[in-house]
Amino acid sequence: QVQLVESGGGLVQAGGSLRLSCAASGSFFSISSMGWYRQAPGKEREFVARMYSGVSPIYADSVKGRFTISRDNAKNTAYLQMNSLKPEDTGVYYCRAVVDRITGPREIWGQGTQVTVSS
């Protein structure tokens, strides 16, 4: 079984910062990509950032220049550093990973962590 565990969410004032973490555990050979999505109340889940192994990360236009995704491959962990937060960044942030297993690649999602930005 493979699982993702997120942490680091919370309540912050506009202009503040938060750092999210996503740790993968279980049985897999490698992680080909890790990324973050978010879902605001009453809205669909949307892409935030994604990082493939050996490739430059990509970001949603709404977070470019403010958010930074990074990975610690030794710890199978991805991070999302969020700076200059805005109230519209509020939502549940989900980690997504594609891991390589003996049965082939598998997509997994974390349980989500709440980020609330007050104005």
Image (cartoon, grey):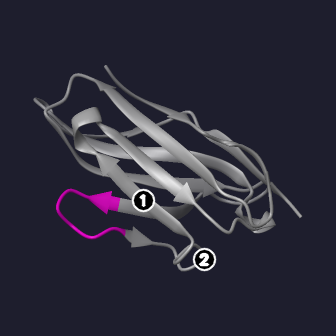
Q: Nearer the viewer, residue 119 or 34?
A: 119
Question: x, y percentage for residue 55?
Answer: 21, 67
Question: x, y percentage for residue 30?
Answer: 17, 39
User: Residue 109 vs residue 97: left or right?
Assistant: right
Relative to 73, residue 29 above or below: above
CB atoms of marks 2 and 1 within 8 Å: no
> Which residue shows up at 33% across the image and 68% down it?
57
> Which residue shows up at 54% across the image and 45% down it?
20
> Which residue shows up at 66% across the image and 59% down it?
44
Question: x, y percentage for residue 29?
Answer: 13, 33
**Does residue 12 belong to the magenta stretch?**
no
Residue bearing mark 2 = 62
Q: Which quadrant is home to the C terminus?
A: bottom right
Question: x, y percentage for residue 100?
Answer: 17, 39
Residue bearing mark 1 = 69
Q: Residues within 10 Å of mark 2 (few under 14, many from 20)?
A: few
User: Residue 30 vs residue 36: left or right?
Assistant: left
Task: Identify the element where label 1 is drawn.
Answer: strand
Furthest residue toward right? 119
What amino acid is labelled 2 in the image?
Answer: Ser
User: Residue 99 vs residue 15: left or right?
Assistant: left
Earlier-in-chain disc, 2 versus 1? 2
Q: Residues within 10 Å of mark 1 (few under 14, many from 20)?
A: many
- What range is drawn magenta here? 51-57
